[in-house]
Amino acid sequence: MFLIIGVWGGPRGSMRAFKFFLYTFLGSVLMLLAIMALYWDAGTTDIPTSCTMPFRVRCRPGRGLLSSPRSP
């Protein structure tokens, strides 16, 4: 995709291709960090096992993206 956008992306194709690379790279890094956090918290990356595990960090609407159950 990078080469296709760079070659046939118009007059600013190389800039568009670079932005495409950055966005996909950032998404990949965030996904890797999420998988690593899942492994560190649950001790496994097995999805059926992970679904039954209680995690320390919860998402609470209105209180920020991540908040610990111990915080008031």
Image (cartoon, rainbow, N blue to C red):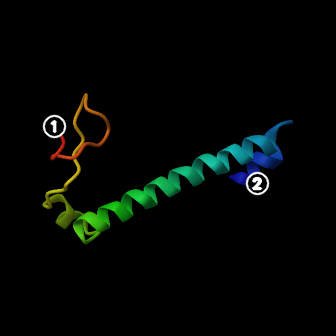
Question: Relative to the observer, which residue lies in front, 3 or 42?
Answer: 42
Residue found at x 80% / y 45%: 14
- The residue at the far bottom in this view is 43
Distance of label 2 from label 1 (alpha carbons): 51 Å
How crowded pointer 2 is (Cα within 10 Å; few <14, some 14-19, many 20+) is rated as few
Q: Position of residue 61 (x, y in %)?
A: 24, 31
Q: Secondary structure at mark 2?
A: helix
Question: Relative to the observer, which residue lies in front, 55 or 69?
Answer: 69
Image label count:
2
Left or right of 9: which side holds 60? left
Viewport quadrant of the C terminus: top left
What kind of residue is marked 1?
Answer: Pro
* Residue matched to label 1: 72
Quarter of the image holding residue 37?
A: bottom left
Left or right of 19: which side holds 29? left
Residue found at x 26% / y 71%: 44
What kind of residue is marked 2?
Answer: Leu
* Residue matched to label 2: 3
Q: Is residue 61 above or below residue 68?
A: above
Label 2 vs 1, first from the N-terminus: 2
Pointer 2 with pointer 1, Cβ within 8 A: no
Left or right of 30: which side holds 52? left
Residue found at x 51% / y 50%: 27
